Image: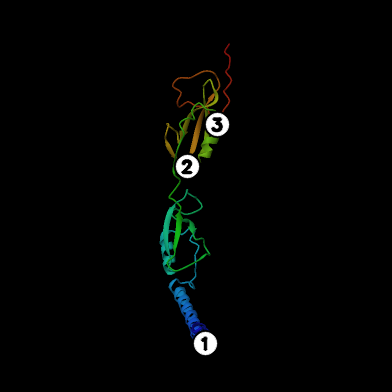
Amino acid sequence: MGLFRFIFSKTFLIQLVLAVIVLVVLSFLTMQWLDYATNQDQRIEVPDLAKMNLDNVENRLDEMDLDYEILDSANFNPDFPRYSVIDQVPAPGKFVKEDRKIYLTLNPSGYRKIEVPNNLIRKTRRQVEPTLRSLGFEIGEISYKPDIAEDAVLELRHKGKLIAPGDEIMKTSVIDMVLGDGSGRYRENDTDTLDTESEPENEVDEF
């Protein structure tokens, strides 16, 4: 009976109320300290760094108490200056805290080199052209040589030089194609004698 009398006594109720008040005050002070320690109220808008070089990026982010880290280089984009920012995370306009890292992707110095497939010789022009274009090459001059197979690829050339199996050429390079004319005959030592998409001249009969 003494315990029940104490629980419902005025003294116990006052102590209980005081304990609740102390708990609420401590919780409030703890939340205020956490807000201060974690910079909850600090919001920095991420700037747009696109097309900026690293010197300008570093100066801009230093002014805003932000840091950066380079992730990687993307495929070359001719619309962006070399070694400039081509992508960033977080995106421009997002809000971050002080000392937050901005992750950057840079535009490389130029197009990368691509290995020309070595299984294109003797395939048809219709097969080879889409393959070269899909790799990022451009098709240049089309020439013909005497050969039994019409429109079969006999040679691939870049800037006049024969492309050997496994050669690596810069993406977007122009590749010239030497095709067979379907005449059914071969000509020896005619490496440099090519007919460039022209009709053969009619022979004049001598009397």
Q: Nearer the viewer, mark 3 or mark 2?
A: 3
CA distance for labels 3 and 2: 19 Å
> Which residue does the image show at 49% across and 78% down from the upper left?
28
> Which numbered disc, 3 or 1, marks the residue that appears first in the sequence?
1
**Residue receiving disc 2:** 171
Quadrant showing the C terminus: top right
In the depicted structure, whether residue 135 falls above or below residue 76: above
Amino acid of disc 1: Ser
In the depicted structure, whether residue 54 falls above or below residue 170: below
> Which residue does the image show at 43% across and 69% down from the upper left?
63
In the rendered image, residue 195, in percent from the top left (x then y), is placed at 52, 27
Amino acid of disc 3: Gln
In the rendered image, residue 12, in percent from the top left (x then y), is placed at 49, 85
Tag 1's secondary structure?
loop
Tag 2's secondary structure?
loop
In the depicted structure, whether residue 8 falls above or below residue 34: below
- The foreground one among 152 and 105 is 105
Residue 67: name its quadrant. Answer: bottom left
> Which residue does the image show at 43% across and 73% down from the upper left?
37
Task: Check if mark 3's residue and mark 2's residue have beta carbons within 8 Å.
Answer: no
Amino acid of disc 2: Lys
> Which numbered disc, 3 or 2, marks the residue that appears first in the sequence?
3
**Residue receiving disc 3:** 127
Please give the label number shown on residue 23. Answer: none
Please give the label number shown on residue 9. Answer: 1
Q: Give the colouring mode of the picture.
A: rainbow
- Would you call the spot at circle 1 few (<14 residues within 10 Å), some (14-19), or many (20 or more)? few
Task: Check if mark 3's residue and mark 1's residue have beta carbons within 8 Å.
Answer: no
Q: Nearer the viewer, mark 1 or mark 2?
A: 1
